[in-house]
């Protein structure tokens, strides 16, 4: 039976991570096509009900390793390796995120298994899984297959959508003996919030400002819009160069590379030097008064108009919508 | 203690990369350079050495790759490593993550390091994984994407940004740590160091020298295979709105955002 | 209205600032035998030749110390900043490596067996038969000079030369009017010159002999000309070439040169130049447009004229179905014989190649002269140091150059370029007559004009350029990206210009620069101000050098900055 094991990450309050739920839903869908079942591994003291609730996302079974701590990869590698070997799972699938990469990589070594990371889609070919991985700045998609079992698939952040299917998972407790080296890293503090310094590489929504803002003061509009949308502010090289905004916010060839869910480009022409830093964004919305601006060639929604008129009204409208 | 820094030669960031359609591997014929993330790992090693919290006898740069990878080692040595090790063998060509991690672990084993540092990702697409693969083979604790390392009482105190915020983790030595580019600003090599780089010892190793099982490496020993390369699905042409009535325009934008669950 | 000339707006730059004595404590200085500045054809031919000669001179080698020969190269690698046509006369290649057949050289694509020259009108291409003799290229080899640089550097390294790439030679070390070496540039300075956290100061590199082989716009070379009074009888002049490399579905079977459209060869516009189109094996071609920098229309842009050129049916047919894979720009010294320096050596130093103006622009040749000069420099230095290792007299180099094919060829073509700015027909006729008489007719000295001398006017060239379609035609920033330029944004500005100038001057720089380094603020563009600000985005710079020709001064950015040419 071709089963797919996933890992369900949870925070200190016991809430499951949405990328993990996405992985469970994806695993359930694929397992259905393969004629098998999807299961999830949970570590730590998570209650029966919470574990069983993962069935709602598609898990048929949940393996719970109570004695294994959450938050660091290596103990979880021990747990997953044991379940994969004992239960004969043929694939392990991870949603995006740092721990998924680490656990998947650890399993690769432990099980002498093939691994594909940054996967955006998985398909079934001849009864086996084939992982699609965008490469070379997403200019090509590599179809990666596995020459032996098990195969490890690590998704890109937000690659898999979580779908509620209804249902409840069977919860099975497993005893895991930790490897000696798995206990040599210990969490001192987890999930510390460090306030204002929003890391633009992690923001889901970015409002990028370019020369079309006219002056440094123009960034105020971007900040207000970003705040209303719950996002962060990014900038082009030209405006950073002009001293309108700090370098830390610079996107592009000589700045940061981002891939948020929404990149709202305000007054950005879309030169290649900027494009390479944000072209992987899921949705690109551009506001520019120049209808010939290159950004309109790769934006999903292009608004030709004066951003000074549009952005403040958009901010208001979003505030109103959120408030109401 | 002895620090080994894993480095890699990658196509220079400025080169337009392409896949060789024959081998389905990255065409590495163009200009190459030391992977920029690895310079942060070397810098981290140098800062530990110069920091003095723990005596560091030696920083060794280790790479796996073809003959040309020697240049990456020279750069690593110019940046401060004391010597370097070059694992090179035709058998290794085409190794996937699993096979590469195994090979690197084998060559590291021969050095018995107290700390292995590496860049968290490489410009040619191997990201976030190699450190954890190597660590499991070496049976060492490991942490990836680290942005701060402090040494005290013979242990490392590392920080990184994880799913729920910043995590602080204490790691016992020996360990494998991959670092992000936020950890430091790498130094420039001095001209003297560049000129002296070729004089520092460089050990060439073949697979047999470090006990690598040839059946587990190279294209034939790899566990994954690239089956096909396809262009990405064509992106739907974007919608364009001319702003005539701003209220109406904003309504359209909000509806568009709403449809995509972005509000 | 007074004539607005770039020469009246000199850059804030004093060449004396880049000349001085060593400053590092004696023990900290890096000692080398011969310091060669520039990893191009001249410098690397010199390095290779030196090692060949030193093989037979163990005693001298010993005296030259641990590092007998070092090449200081500002590019990421040797070849990163090299760009040329290029069809190369093989005489220098065979002289340097007699055992290698030029056809087997890795940078060589093929031997030229067929060539053709066309005169273009906006719609047609009229073959010139027979082709002008100075464009006959049969028997030469088509190669990529950026690949040649890499190849020569590899050979040199194998022979024991230290190639110090990513290192800018920013100061000429001179003591008692004797050149003692060069100082490498600092790295890790911020926008305002402040030291960043990873600041690494430069080093004094002291040498028994220094070879300046800096290429077209010699940062130290021209400072040395001033200091040692080496200027030739006429000022140096330059042409600017912009070049592209394309992958094409079908090979090109000949070397092509064109004259005429889209350049305006009248005395009013002085857009003297033409194009080259060269095959690069079975699947690539390269082509470029080269124009004298004494043109007068401030809106003229070689980059955009090249884009326009590609829309001509004649060239479109050659690259149809292809893909642009390379782009770059570079100036070419065009002053020729009259702009050669008064002497090629001063105590402790020699100059070679493009830096010394060793280009025969009429015959589009310079690479083999550069290599020959490099080899002569090597021979002269070894002869001199062999006699006395502390000798600083390299005057035998001057004699070698004077007796060589370099000076002979340049003398023959000494007046060919100048008449071209008086229009194509007059210039073409004069040129043909000069070639036919090997330069005897009409003889005399046709004065080379400083490129910054002609008055600039706001003409209409700029109105005719096509809007980039990203398939056939491209904008400047896309092109800079393709050149591999990824210069750190917070580095100090290395371009010296006056930043408040008449609109004509500002527009000249904006249009001329192929890399979009100069910009006039939007509001000043619109409000018609006669005097405008010039904003400089130095990180776009591909170091072509045109700004030095037309009123500014290119200095050296941090080592490693600038383009990473692969196959130009």
Image (cartoon, coloured by chain):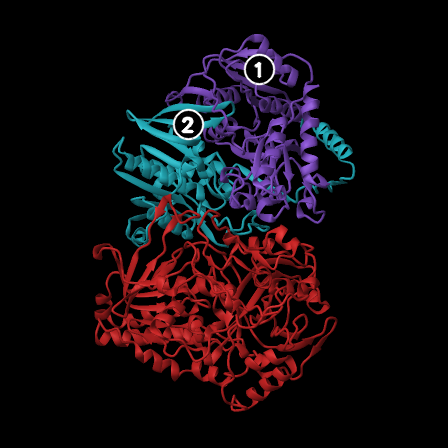
Residue at screen point 44% across, 23% down: B167
- The tint of chain A in the picture is purple
Q: Residue B49, relative to residue C551: is it above or below?
A: above
Label 2 resides on the chain identified as B
* Residue placed most toward the observer, C342 or A49: C342
Q: Is residue C253 left or right of residue C227?
A: right
**Chain coloured red: which letter?**
C
- The tint of chain B in the picture is cyan
Work out whether residue C268 can be spotted: yes
Label 1 resides on the chain identified as A
The residues tagged by marks 1 and 2 sit, at their Cα atoms, a distance apart of 31 Å
Q: Position of residue C5 (x, y in %)?
A: 55, 69
Residue on which the image places disc 1: A62
Q: Residue A307, relative to residue C505: is it above or below?
A: above
Q: Position of residue A290 (x, y in %)?
A: 70, 47
Q: Is residue B138 left or right of residue C305?
A: left
Q: Position of residue B237 (x, y in %)?
A: 73, 42
Residue on which the image places disc 2: B159
């Amino acid at each position: 039976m071709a089963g797919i094991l996933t890992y369900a990450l949870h925070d200190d309050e016991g809430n499951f991570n949405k990328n993990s739920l996405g992985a469970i839903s994806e695993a359930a869908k694929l397992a259905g096509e393969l004629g098998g079942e999807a299961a999830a591994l949970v570590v730590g003291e998570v209650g029966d009900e919470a574990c069983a609730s993962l069935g709602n996302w598609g898990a048929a079974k949940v393996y719970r390793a109570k004695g294994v701590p959450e938050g660091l990869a290596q103990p979880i590698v021990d747990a997953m390796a044991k379940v994969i070997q004992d239960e004969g799972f043929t694939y392990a699938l991870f949603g995006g995120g740092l721990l998924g990469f680490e656990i998947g990589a650890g399993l690769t070594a432990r099980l002498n298994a093939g691994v594909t990371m940054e996967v955006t889609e998985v398909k079934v070919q001849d009864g086996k899984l084939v992982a699609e991985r965008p490469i070379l700045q997403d200019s090509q998609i590599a179809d990666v297959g596995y020459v032996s079992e098990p195969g490890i698939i690590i998704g890109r952040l937000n690659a898999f959508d979580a779908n509620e299917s209804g249902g409840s998972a069977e919860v099975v407790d497993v005893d895991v003996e930790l490897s000696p080296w798995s206990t040599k890293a210990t969490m001192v503090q987890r999930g510390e919030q460090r306030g204002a310094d929003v890391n633009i590489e992690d923001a889901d929504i970015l409002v990028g400002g370019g020369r079309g803002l006219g002056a440094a003061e123009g960034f105020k509009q971007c900040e207000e819009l970003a705040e209303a949308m719950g996002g962060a502010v990014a900038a082009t090289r030209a405006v950073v160069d002009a001293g309108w905004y700090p370098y830390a916010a610079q996107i592009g060839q000589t700045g940061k590379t981002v891939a948020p869910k929404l990149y709202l480009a305000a007054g950005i022409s879309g030169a290649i030097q900027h494009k390479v830093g944000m072209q992987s964004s899921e949705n690109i919305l551009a506001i520019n008064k120049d209808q010939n601006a290159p950004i309109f060639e790769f934006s999903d929604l292009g608004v030709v108009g004066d951003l000074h008129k549009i952005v403040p009204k958009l901010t208001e409208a979003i505030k109103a919508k959120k408030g109401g | 203690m002895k620090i080994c820094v894993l480095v890699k030669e990658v196509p220079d960031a400025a080169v337009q990369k392409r896949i060789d359609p024959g081998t389905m591997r990255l065409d590495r014929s163009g200009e190459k350079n030391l992977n920029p993330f690895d310079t942060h790992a070397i810098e981290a090693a140098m800062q530990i050495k110069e920091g003095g919290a723990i005596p560091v006898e030696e920083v060794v740069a280790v790479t796996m790759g073809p003959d040309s990878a020697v240049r990456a080692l020279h750069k690593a040595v110019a940046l401060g490593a004391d010597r370097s090790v070059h694992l090179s063998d035709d058998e290794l060509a085409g190794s996937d993550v699993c096979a590469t991690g195994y090979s690197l672990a084998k060559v590291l084993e021969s050095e018995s390091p107290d700390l292995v540092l590496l860049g968290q990702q490489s410009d040619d697409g191997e990201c976030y994984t190699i450190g954890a693969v190597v660590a499991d083979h070496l049976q060492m604790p490991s942490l990836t994407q680290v942005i701060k390392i402090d040494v005290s009482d013979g242990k490392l105190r590392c920080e990184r940004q994880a799913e729920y915020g910043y995590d602080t983790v204490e790691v016992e030595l020996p360990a494998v740590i991959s670092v992000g580019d936020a950890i430091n600003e790498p130094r420039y090599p001095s001209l003297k160091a560049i000129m002296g780089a070729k004089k520092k010892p460089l050990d060439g190793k073949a697979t047999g020298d470090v006990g690598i099982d040839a059946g587990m490496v190279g294209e034939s020993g790899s566990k994954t295979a690239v089956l096909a390369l396809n262009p990405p699905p064509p992106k739907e042409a974007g919608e364009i709105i001319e702003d005539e009535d701003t209220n109406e325009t904003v309504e359209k934008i909000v509806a568009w955002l709403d449809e995509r669950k972005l509000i | 209205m007074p004539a607005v000339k770039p020469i009246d707006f000199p850059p804030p730059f004093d060449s004396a600032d880049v000349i001085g004595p060593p400053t590092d404590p004696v023990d900290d200085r890096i000692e080398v035998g011969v310091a060669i500045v520039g990893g191009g054809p001249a410098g690397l031919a010199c390095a290779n030749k030196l090692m060949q000669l030193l093989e037979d001179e163990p005693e001298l080698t010993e005296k030259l110390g641990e590092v007998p020969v070092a090449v200081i190269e500002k590019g990421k690698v040797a070849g990163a900043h090299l760009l040329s046509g290029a069809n190369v006369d093989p005489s220098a290649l065979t002289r340097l490596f007699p055992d290698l057949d030029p056809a087997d050289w890795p940078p060589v694509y093929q031997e030229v067996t067929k060539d053709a020259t066309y005169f273009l009108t906006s719609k047609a291409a009229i073959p010139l038969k027979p082709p002008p003799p100075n464009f006959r290229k049969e028997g030469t080899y088509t190669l990529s000079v950026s690949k040649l640089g890499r190849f020569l550097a590899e050979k040199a390294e194998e022979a024991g030369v230290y190639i110090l790439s990513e290192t800018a030679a920013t100061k000429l070390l001179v003591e008692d009017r004797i050149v003692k070496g060069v100082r490498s540039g600092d790295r890790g300075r911020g926008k305002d010159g402040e030291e960043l956290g990873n600041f690494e100061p430069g080093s004094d590199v002291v040498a028994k002999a220094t070879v300046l082989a800096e290429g077209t716009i010699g940062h130290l070379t021209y400072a040395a000309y001033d200091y040692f009074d080496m200027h030739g009888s006429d000022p140096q002049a330059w042409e600017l070439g912009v070049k592209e490399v394309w992958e094409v579905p079908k090979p090109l079977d000949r070397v092509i040169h064109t004259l005429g459209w889209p350049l305006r060869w009248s005395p009013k516009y002085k857009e003297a130049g033409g194009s080259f189109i060269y095959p690069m094996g079975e699947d690539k071609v390269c082509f470029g447009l080269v124009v004298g920098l004494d043109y007068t229309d401030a809106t003229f842009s070689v980059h955009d004229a090249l884009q326009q050129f590609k829309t001509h049916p004649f060239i479109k047919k050659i690259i149809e179905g292809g893909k642009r894979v390379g782009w770059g720009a570079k100036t070419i010294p065009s002053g020729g014989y009259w702009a050669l320096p008064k002497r090629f050596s001063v105590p402790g130093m020699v100059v070679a190649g493009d830096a010394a103006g060793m280009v025969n622009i009429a015959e589009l040749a310079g690479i083999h002269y550069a290599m020959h000069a490099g080899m002569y420099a090597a021979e002269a230095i070894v002869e001199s140091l062999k006699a006395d290792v502390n000798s600083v007299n390299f005057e035998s180099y001057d004699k070698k150059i004077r007796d060589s094919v370099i000076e002979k060829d340049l003398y023959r073509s000494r007046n060919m370029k100048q008449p071209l700015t008086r229009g194509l027909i007059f210039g073409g006729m004069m040129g043909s007559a000069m070639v036919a008489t090997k330069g005897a007719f009409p003889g005399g000295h046709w004065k080379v004009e400083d490129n910054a001398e002609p008055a600039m006017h706001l003409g209409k060239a700029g109105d005719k350029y096509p809007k980039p379609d990203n398939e056939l035609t491209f904008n400047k920033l896309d092109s800079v990206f393709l050149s591999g330029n990824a210069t750190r944004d917070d580095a100090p500005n290395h371009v010296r210009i006056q930043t408040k100038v008449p609109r004509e001057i500002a527009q000249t720089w904006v249009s001329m620069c192929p890399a979009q380094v100069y910009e006039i603020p939007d509001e000043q563009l619109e409000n018609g101000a006669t005097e405008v600000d010039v904003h400089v985005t130095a990180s776009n710079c591909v170091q072509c050098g045109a700004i030095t020709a037309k009123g500014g001064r290119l200095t050296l950015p941090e080592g490693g900055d600038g383009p990473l040419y692969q196959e130009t």
